[in-house]
Amino acid sequence: MTGLQGFFVPKTASGASSLIPSPPWLYSGDLLTVEYRTDPARVRELLPEPLELADEDPGAVALIWADWQSCAAGKEELLDPVRAQYKEAFVVVRCTYEGRTYSRCVYIWVDKDFAIARGLHQGYPKKLGSIHQTRPHPFGPAPRIEAGARFGATLAAADRRLAQAVITLREPAETNGFVNGHPMAHHRWLPAIEKGGGLALDELIESGAASFEGGRPWTGDAELELFEAPTEELSRLEVREPIAAYYRQVGVVWDGGRLLESRTRNDQ
């Protein structure tokens, strides 16, 4: 690709058309998290080899809504908000690899193309969706961050509602949950171009925040409903037992990951 520039496609002479810039990527966001327990067998069916169920609380699930502003190191996107703002809803479980506990995103929906492209690079299985959540505000009818504040969150894809939640804050907390509290163990997969050629890219990678800062978490209770849809399987992770709900504002920097193992054809 002599003369072509850009971190991601489309590559051009200048690189200005690239769907995403090179890392580091910086994020500011409001997170609503609902943790609950499901059948561990439903978690296990989503873990490819060599990943195994977490030793403790293997059926624990976190469904997280996030309202993000993001940018590259130069921060130009923040002054062109259409390139910075997006929303997502993602489902996290825990697993083990070589005796270490990891978090893993098994489903995720976003509402911008650049977020999907970043997911391809990071191993997140991103799809387009419609995601909404109540925003806090110190004036008017919006909830304040205080005991009794109520937040709604909805997720839909392909015109079908997949999940909805109402979260009621109760008190400050030390964390915003435990399911999404580890480095991520993700797969980067790309099918070969030849029929029957398997995977041209097959990597298990570890990634996480290069740096993190966050406001005081609040915990509370959630009413969560999951719905069936023809092309989605979120409802298989049925709610058997609520754990807790959380609200937190965070700032994150992502700047690459680490290869754990590769089964890519040229590496075998």
Image (cartoon, rainbow, N blue to C red):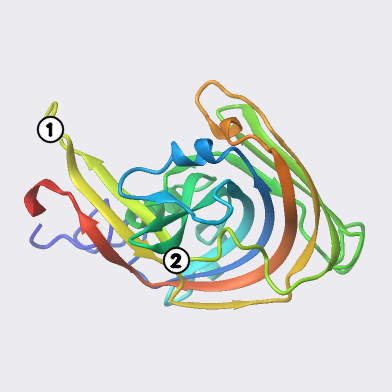
Amino acid residing under circle 2: Pro
Q: Which residue is mark 1?
A: 197
Counting other residues with Cα less than 10 Å from the Cα at mark 2, is it few (<14), some (14-19), or many (20 or more)?
A: some
Residue for point 54% across, 51% down: 92
> Residue 25's x, y, as percent?
43, 69
Would you place residue 22 above or below residue 123 in this image? below
Return the x and y of residue 57 as percentages of the image width and height. Answer: 59, 53
The disc label shown at residue 183, or none: 2
Does residue 132 appear left or right of residue 205 in this picture? right
Alpha-carbon neighbours of circle 1 within 10 Å: few (<14), some, or many (≥20)? few
Secondary structure of the residue carrying tag 1 is loop
Residue found farthest to the front: 55
Residue visible at 58% across and 24% down? 229
Badge 2 marks a residue whose secondary structure is: loop
- Tell me where residue 175 sits by quadrant: bottom right
Residue visible at 79% across and 49% down in the picture: 222
Q: Point out the tag, 1 or 2, that comes first from the N-terminus.
A: 2
Which sits in the foreground, 200 or 93? 93
Residue furthest out toward the top: 230
Residue at figure coordinates x 54%, y 77% from the top left: 212
Q: Amino acid at mark 1?
A: Gly
The picture quadrant where one finds residue 78 is bottom right
Q: Nearer the viewer, residue 203 or 3?
A: 203
Q: Position of residue 88 (x, y in %)?
A: 57, 50
Q: Position of residue 188 (x, y in %)?
A: 30, 50
Tag nearer the camera, 1 or 2: 2
Compared with residue 228, is residue 100 higher up or lower down, i.e. above or below? below
